[in-house]
Amino acid sequence: MFIGPLLVQIPLLIALGVGILLAALRWNRHPQVSKWAIIGFGGMMFNVIVFGALSPLVVSTLSRSGESATSIGTTLAFISIAGGLLGVIWWGCIIAAVFGSREKAM
């Protein structure tokens, strides 16, 4: 039930995993940049998994408890806002990685 919405995200999760792997492989050459890339890609992966599973769980739980559609919609809106705000943070980390300094490790 909660796996279905995540199945369509598999290509994105693979791409984020590749980003983490590439950043880890380049850690010795660009540790600061790699750190920001890993944090950004990892955070985006977190968002996809957690918020992808959380929304159907909330709908199911609140529906069973008799909550109104308005209440469920409001709850989903707050969850979406939280996911969006976290997404901004993760994108900030990616931008820091892309435009960060490329000093070599000593």
Image: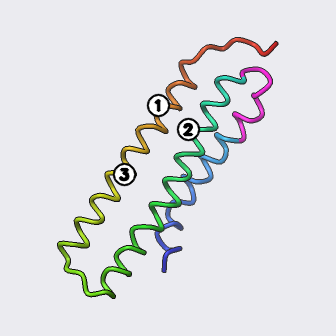
Give me the residue at 65% from left, 48% from top.
Answer: 17
Instruction: Bin the neighbour count of mark 2 within 10 Å (Cα to Cα): few under 14, some 14-19, many 20 and up.
Output: many
| Residue 82, label in figure | 3
Magenta segment range? 21-30
Q: CA distance from mark 3 to mark 2?
A: 16 Å
C-alpha distance separating marks 2 and 1: 7 Å
86 or 28: nearer the viewer: 86
Rendered image quadrant of residue 88: top left
Task: Judge the density around disc 3: few (<14), some (14-19), many (≥20) Cα neighbours within 10 Å.
Answer: few
Q: Which of the marked residues, 3 or 2, is nearer the chain's N terminus? A: 2
User: x and y percent of residue 93 in the render?
Assistant: 52, 31
Name the front one of labels 3 and 2.
Answer: 3
Q: Where is residue 16 drawn, in percent x and y? A: 60, 46
Q: Are marks 2 and 1 in contact (CB under 8 Å)?
A: yes
The residue pinned by badge 1 equals: 92
Name which of mark 1 and mark 3 comes first in the sequence.
3
The residue wearing badge 2 is: 40
